[in-house]
Structures are given as structure tokens and as C-alpha cells.
Amino acid sequence: MTTTLTIDLDAIAANWRLLVARHSAPVAAVIKADGYGLGAIPVARKLQQAGCKHFFTAHLSEALAVRDTIPDEFLAVLNGLQASDVEIFAAHNIRPVLGSLAEIELWCAHAKTLDRPLSCLIHIDTGMNRLGLPPSELAILANDPSLLSGLSVDYMMTHLVAADEPASNINARQAASFYTACTHFPGIKTSFANSSGLFLGSAFTSDLARPGAALYGVNPTPGLPNPLRQTVHLSAKILQIRDIQSGESVGYSAAWTANRPSRIATIAVGYADGYLRHLSNNGAARFDGAPIPLVGRVSMDLTTFDVTGTKAMPGDALVLLDAHYGVDDLAQAAGTNGYEILTSFRNRCTRVYLGA
Ligand SMILES: *Cc1c(COP(=O)(O)O)cnc(C)c1O
């Protein structure tokens, strides 16, 4: 057991509560991609105990994987409805987020077959141009409410394009088109903000917020202090320490060369663990609270750090992620975002759950 990913479920629950305190209506939990890489089942169980009643996944398979953990909660699938899946959705009381007239028709037809109302959400596209009813289909639906017969629509929903850029005027445009669209569906609740949307102000309030990333500690307000707690701690024991001379290189392609006599520590973490190769020559770890630079390439199973001048010994732990150097810091070093850092974690390292 040399590499340990510790996931703090209490911090995730605290983050959910902080978001709840920011919103006047219920706050769901998005647990797609296996709970942003941290484990959808333990996260769902913890948040359900904390009082969360609404959960979203991207895929039906992800919803099925957590259904037994949260058998009675509202559980919805963001990616929509495929004809082959209608029976499974209905049998497990999982709500599809319907994103086209064709999907609405499928769900209506199944409601007719079962002769009972079926629950769902309707996704309106207000600018993302990926999923959701485009304006042309929205106009058809708004003019013909009978297209929804047999359906119990819990929420009209849309998704923000640039919520993490508060200065972007796309946000206000989306709020205006969403709430204008919703006037055609009086009595149906709304679901709008993601993590960053919860920090955009009252125009982005709805009947159900849908944060994901912020629950797991990603900063929803880039450039400002992170109001959330870090939820992951990654550490790895040093396997070996090599003393090298000035002019010697380290690792594949000799991508780093020492310009002084150096001590190089090797740990059992690589890109196969989700420690991104883009961190080569650019990441950092901490030993005894002090930063130490990543040197050379991140390889599949091993990464090397320059521990010159420290007291590090084989068997000592290097800390790769903690409260001081969090997912957004690592993301910056890797040229990506905290979402990709979290969802890259693989199951090879030992996982420890705090607060389970
Ligand atoms: C992923 C997703 C969310 C959550 O977004 P975060 O930025 O992680 O808070 C909300 N709604 C939809 C439609 C999504 O796809």
C-alpha cells in the first residue's frame, strides 16, 4: 500500500450544505462520472444522509449503479432517453432528462403503454448547442401542450455555458431565454444553476440547483478564494532515492537534466493512476510541508521529484494533493481544470473514505 487517495466525505457533505445555504430552493447533487471520480456510491450515501434528495448522473448505467444506495430519492439522467432504455428507466423510477421532441414522444408512448404518468425533466437548449430542445422544437412544444400528455414534468431545465466567467454576457442571455421559455409552461418548476451558477446572483436561482464540481472542492469562482473545502488527499511513499551528478538525466527521453548534484525520489504514481502526463517537469508535491518540484516525465506507474536539500528517505510520504495544494492547483500545473483532475483518478491506488 504505497499510494493512498483519501476522500473526505464529511468535506463533501459540508460543501453541499454551504451550497444549500446559498440557494433559496433545494440543491441536488450531480454524481455523474462515478461522483467526479471519487465514488458515486459513497458520495450518494453520504449526501442522502446529509439531507440531499435529488441526484443526477449522465448515463443510465450510472443511475442504475447507485439506485440501490438511494432507492427512494429523485434520480435523473442528464444525457436523455434512448428507445432501448425506456423500460429500464420506468422500472427503476429513474427520470430521463428529455432533450428533444423525439425523446418526449418516446416517453409519452411508454406512459400510454403503462397507462400511468411518467416523470421526467425537459431540457431546453439556451446556447450550449449540445443537448436540449433547440428553439424550433421549443416553439412546437410551447404551442401544443398535448405533446406532454401522460407525462409528469418535474422541472424545465437548462445548462449554463460560461457560469465560471461572471463577466460573460452569455449568462444573462441564457437566464433571459430560459425564463422566457418557462412562461410557456406555467406550474412546472425550474432547474438552472450548476456549481458556478450558484455564485452568479439571484437571477440564476431556480427551484433546483444542480452543482457537481463544487461538491468535490473545485473552485466555482476562479480567480477568487475558493469558498469550498478540499475533499481529496493524495499521497505516495517514496520507493527509492537516487543520488545523481550534475549533467545526469532522469526518466524517459531524458526530459530533465540535473544542473547540480541532486537527490531524486521516485513514487508509485503515474498517468495510469490519473496523475496526468501533462504534469511532466511542471507539477509539484510537498514533503514536510515544503514544495518539491516534479522532474522529468510522468510515466505510467512512476513519477520523480527533486528532493535535494530535504531529509526525505525511502518510505516517507510525498503529498500530491491536500488542503494547501488542491485540485485546482494541480489542474493549473497540468494545463486543465479541476474536473479533469478529479475524473482522471483510477482505482489502482488505495482508497480511504473519511466520514463513511
Ligand atoms: C455536469 C452538469 C452539471 C454540474 O455541473 P458543475 O459545473 O460540475 O457544477 C449540471 N447540469 C448539467 C446538465 C451537467 O451536465
Image (cartoon, helix red, strand yellow):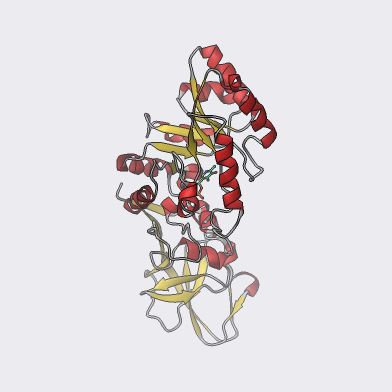
Between 222 and 352, the residue placed more toward the observer is: 222
Q: Residue at x 47, y 31 (%)?
A: 64
Q: Tally the numbered discs.
A: 0
Between 103 and 204, the residue placed more toward the observer is: 204
Between 189 and 340, the residue placed more toward the observer is: 189
Q: Residue at x 53, y 33 (%)?
A: 60
Between 26 and 233, the residue placed more toward the observer is: 26
Query: Looking at the picture, does residue 305 appear above or below residue 207?
Result: below
**x and y, in percent, of residue 216 in the image:** 43, 53
Could you say which quadrant of the image residue 322 lies in? bottom left
Q: Residue furthest right?
A: 136
Can residue 161 be seen here? The reply is no
| Left or right: 268 in relation to 336 | left
Quadrant (top left/top right/bottom left/bottom right) for the N terminus: bottom left
Could you say which quadrant of the image residue 286 lies in? bottom left
Q: Residue at x 52, y 72 (%)?
A: 294
**x and y, in percent, of residue 221 in the image:** 48, 60
Query: Looking at the picture, does residue 342 appear above or below residue 254?
Result: above
| Left or right: 174 in relation to 3 | right
Could you say which quadrant of the image residue 28 lies in? top left
Q: Residue at x 51, y 13 (%)?
A: 114
